[in-house]
Amino acid sequence: MANVEHGGTAGNAFGAGAAESARARLRAIRIGLWVIAAVLAIRQVTVVLSTPKGERLTDLETWVGPNGVLHVKGSLYDSTQFTGTPFGGLVLKPLTRAAEQALGWGWTFGSLSLVVVLGLVVARALPHPVSRRTALLAAPVAISLLMLSLPVRNALYLGQTSIIPVLLVLLGCFAVRGERASGLLIGVAAALQPTMLLFAPLLWFTGRRRAVESSAITFAGLGALAWAAMPHDSTTYWVHHLAGVGLGGDADDLSNQSLHGALLRLGLNGPLEITLFLLLGAGVAALGLRRAIRYARDGQLLLAVAITGCVAVVVSPTSWQHQLLWVLLALVGRVGKKTSDRPMWPVAVILVMTLPAKMMLPNMAALFPLRDNVVLLAALAAATIVPFLSRTSEYYRAPIPTDYARPVPTRWKRVPLLPFLGRVFTRPNLLLELLLIRVGYSAYQQVRLAATGGTSAGGRATAEHHGDQILSIERFLHIDIEHWVNHAVFKVEWLRDFFDFYYESFHFVVPLTVLAVLYARRPGDYRWARSALGFATLIALLGFWLFPLAPPRLMPGLGVVDTVHGVQDFSKPDYGTLTALTNQYAAMPSLHFGWSLWCGVVIAVLAPKWWMKALGLLHPLFTVSAIVATGNHWVLDAVGGAAVVGAGFGLTHLLQGPRPRPLMKPVEVSMKEPVPATGRTPS
């Protein structure tokens, strides 16, 4: 030990080995992330090139195809199909001479290369100080997120140019040397997309005034060049269409995620809408640019650029879906004083920018204004209200740490496989949990419906065949009680009404209530229970996919009555508003019973009083009675539901270990009456 401590030889060898092991792990992670980025890139190219001709690169075809607007001798804007600037049309015109197939391949791979360069620039632009691990992993992560984002996917699929202005601005701010070169690139970006002129105030108030002058000269020069080459088109674009307003699709279309589009969708129009748009746009621009300047001076230039881009999205008359890449870049900002709150903002942005809006919010009329404008709201929030941390904040690099429960001994050596998941004791971020629950349930609905080919009636023959198999097994086991129970309950009106109500009402209410109580009072147990429920649901989805099954009420000739929706026409079943939205052949396993059994187990394990445990166990008993009595499930479906719940708890134990125990509070020792050395207490 003396040699180790004073000589340092053994210690250095041990330290070198640990460092080499850490470098090897980092290298493996980095290679894995690059592989993921490459797979995503290949997938995007495959999707585009495998799409039938006439359905892919439609915007590019509209511009430079044999009958494209750039071939027309008249104005580019006669058909309103070309929405770019006159300079953009001037740049694209030479492409009309290219071979159609070669142009498609070249455009796709060229756009893909621009996305890769964009990811590399973003990774390089992260605010300092950046750890070596972050620097090495940032590039593949950034490229992967860009590949997954809806703006990039739409740009690749449609053959759009929207990636180019974003890349030019980022190159001008982070890659080139010299303010004049920086301004030149931003001026070219503004010539292609005029809202990029909003970056001029950011440059001016952060001391880069030569860049502003250079960008203004470049923008004016390229505009003059286009005006000289195409005077009629330039007059149409800048004068008659007020810098492109009114070109392209209808401004109130859902794909226009600008403030102007949102106001039109809300039913406003005419002078009132224009006045309100101008006033709100001016307010957003003033507040957003002020915030951007503040963060730029704070050393977070990438965040400042992203905020300015979000301002451009909001105040532009038209911000089509493929032009919304700035919102994704805003995830670089740090939000939240607690470690557990840090993922909230980036996860929310990633979900908004990669998933359809219908997956984010329920299909309720009251929520349509939010759902239809979800990307706009994200851009508006980033530009004006999200409290990004300053680098001078004490929480910027050292947020309030997460509490961890003490490890619980396990019987098996390799359990838990992921111990950090099971020991977190801090209450998770509520908004993030609600968002993930909503997205998870939406994915569950989509997979459940896709199991029969995307239609509720799809796979009927297979589902009925599987129903015959289940019935044969139950008859062999002498548990085919569905017909008898169904008719016995149907004859007793109050009992039928009770089971119908229980079936329709308690499936969601009880699990959500259990989750809410655990979240509020026992966050450690909440994580354990939530994980088990999530794993059980994922396994059930696999069952829906592999074994579509008709419930007893949809089996011809069985004579089971649908007590909830009435007697069915099996060729066109009608089960209310969910007819076109749910897969009625997703009966095995029964998540109605599975979720109720999960509730019963959680309550029985965690409830402090015996009567609470008893009530918890009554819920799965009532549920299994309801699903059989209403004709919605076979008895074996309940067995399947119990199996997936057991597997969910088993996977949770395997990955996270046993339930975490509460943190031990330090014992307070009173110093008023010291204990004698003999160990005897004073009499």
Image: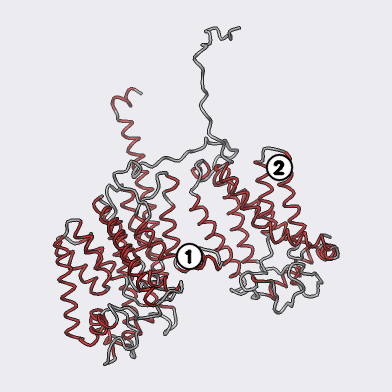
Between 63 and 447, the one nearer to me in the picture: 63
Task: Point out the image quarter for the N terminus.
Answer: top left
Residue 140 visible in the displayed image? no
* Numbered disc total: 2
Q: Is residue 34 visible?
A: yes
In front: mark 1 or mark 2? 1
Residue 115 placement: quadrant: bottom left
Q: Point out residue 436 in the picture as x, y percentages from the top left corner.
A: 51, 56
Name which quarter of the figure residue 552 lies in: bottom right
Q: Circle 1 — which element?
A: helix
Residue name at image x 26 percent, y 87 percent: 97
Q: Secondary structure at mark 2?
A: helix
Quarter of the figure that contains the C terminus: top right
Residue name at image x 16 percent, y 72 percent: 218
Which residue occupies the foreground of this view, 495 or 30?
495
Q: Are marks 1 and 2 in contact (CB under 8 Å)?
A: no
Residue 145 to residue 274: above or below: above
> Against 557, is 657 above or below?
above
Mark 1 to mark 2: distance in Å?
Answer: 39 Å
Identify the mark nearer the N-term, 1 or 2. 1
Looking at the rendered structure, the kind of residue marked 1 is Leu
x, y percent for residue 188 = 21, 72
Could you say where residue 349 lies in the image, as x and y percent from the top left? 41, 59
User: What's the residue at 40%, 56% (across, down)?
Assistant: 32
Three-letter amino acid code at disc 2? Met
Residue designated by label 2: 612
> Label 1 belongs to which residue?
370
Left or right: residue 9 versus residue 644 is: left
622 or 125, nearer to the observer:
622
Q: Is residue 85 above or below residue 663?
A: below
Residue 404 screen position, x and y as percent: 49, 38
